[in-house]
Image: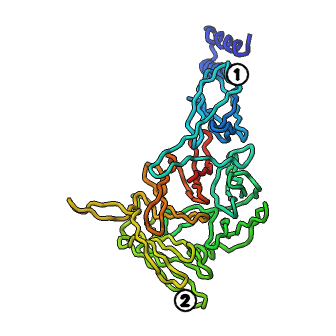
Amino acid sequence: MSFVSQTVDAVLKVFLCGSCKNPFLPMYKAILLVHVLVLAAISLRCQEYELSGKVVDSRDNTPLANVNVIVAGLPKGTITNEAGFFSLRIYQIPAQLYFSHIGYAVVSVIVDEKNRIGILISLEPEVQQIDEVTVMASPIRKIRLGDTLNVIDYDFVGENRMVLVASPYKNSIEKYLFLADGDGRQINKLMVKQIGKQIKFPEQLTPEQVYLFKSFDGSCLLLNHHDVKEVAIEGDSILLHEYSDIPEFLSLVLPIKTRLGDRLFFQWSTKINNWTFMTVPSGNHPMMVKEVYDPYGNERYVKPPGAPGYIKKHVSAPCFSLSENVLVFDFFENHIDFIDAEGQSIRQVPINFHLIDKRIALLFTAKELNQREFKQIIIQDEVTHKFYALFQPVGKKFFLEEIDVETGNMINKIELPEFPNVVKVKVHDGKLFFLYQVKQFPAYVSLYKMDL
């Protein structure tokens, strides 16, 4: 007779004992009943079934890492390792498993006693057809063997290399600086402590926790609570050099947007103005080369009800260097201003990708800034020197539009997959990168790329 059966028998005897006058009998009965139920549940759960298998790409049978393996109706799940293998234990079969990965169609299978070992799953890439261009999401490989990484921030250094700030999924306090190649394969890592600094960029509505920052001269900077360090790569080693303290960074480095030879271009802004200045070698006062004016800046952004403080979003005028010129985007006069090394505007290219039609009377419409979808963010690919406007429609897919800066026309529209938690979108060497928080088990942030 099992221990559970003996316990049940003892409980029955207590319940059937009419001569027992113990005043605590009702409490004993309740306690014993709970114990019996728990032991019975444990006994039932002792029957475990191991499930194992492998997930591959249908195109070439390449093993797929970080594939989410979910048991339908249960919080139980796992992910595949670097070799595409997975293993988990469940207490009831048959069971339905779901296999999902960004960039691939979801696959579901029913497993039972006969097919629970050696499951082979082949995932089909999910191609998204768009009007101007077809894109396919392809995942960056996991760069820490044996664990899943929460990727916090990333940037590009040198040729076909990237730096990532990440923490192990099982230990979010511990943070590392990873050096990886363009496919996400780890080259080196360095433990870092007390990193990240909350910064309120003038052109943004809310503060942002910043870890990595690309300076005007192309340096990759790592911010912590007290100072800023330059991330230097020598061979395969990661070195941190002293750069500046936080006050110096905020006042002297952050305002500088780009450079043209020995001329630095920096900006100062308010809620209605953005001024671009250029330094001159003679040491004289900086020269103002561009003013952008938003006539409705004071009323354009309204503080949400109940939000603390007040709205302080300054005018945005993205500024980049291209060949022998500096480009300043003016979203209110609707042009791109080309400025030479002497600080002179040599031409203005009209643009309208940032505008929408607004009805002002029954039969009349006017163009105005599409502030609901266009966040006044322009992304430059530092390798191909192409420019992209980022759109973030509420409740819809993010998308980019490639800008021909010579004509102001839009060339291609590139849609991101329909993920609700996309952040830190960048373009590098013809590929689009972004961070995405996976909602399925386990929830973690991964870095993904898309070929453009």
For marks 1 and 2, the one nearer the N-term is: 1
Q: Which mark is residue 46?
A: 1
- Residue 86 versus residue 345 in the image, above or below: above
Tell me whether the residue at label 1 lies in contact with that at label 2, contact meaning CB atoms closer than 8 angstroms.
no
Foreground: 160 or 393?
Answer: 160
Query: x, y percentage for residue 392?
Result: 46, 55
Query: x, y percentage for residue 135?
Result: 53, 49
Mark count: 2
Query: x, y percentage for residue 161?
Result: 70, 59
SS class, disc 2 = loop
Front: mark 1 or 2: 2
Residue 437 located left or right of residue 347: right
**Residue lying furthest left in this view?**
362
Residue shown at the point (43%, 64%) measured from the top left = 409
Residue shown at the point (68%, 41%) measured from the top left = 65
The CA span between labels 1 and 2 is 79 Å
- Could you tell me the amino acid type at mark 2? His
Residue shown at the point (52%, 47%) measured from the top left = 417
Foreground: 266 or 172?
Answer: 266
SS class, disc 1 = loop
- Could you tell me the amino acid type at mark 1? Cys
Circle 2 packing at 10 Å, graded few (<14), some (14-19), many (20+), is few
Classify residue 115 by image quadrant.
top right
Residue 336 located left or right of residue 379: left
Query: x, y percentage for residue 179?
Result: 72, 57
Q: Is residue 437 visible?
A: yes
Q: Which residue is mark 2?
A: 285
Circle 1 packing at 10 Å, graded few (<14), some (14-19), many (20+), is few
Q: Which mark is residue 143?
A: none
Residue shown at the point (47%, 56%) measured from the top left = 412
Question: Split into 4 quadrants, where in the image is the C terminus?
Answer: bottom right
Question: Split into 4 quadrants, where in the image is the N terminus?
Answer: top right
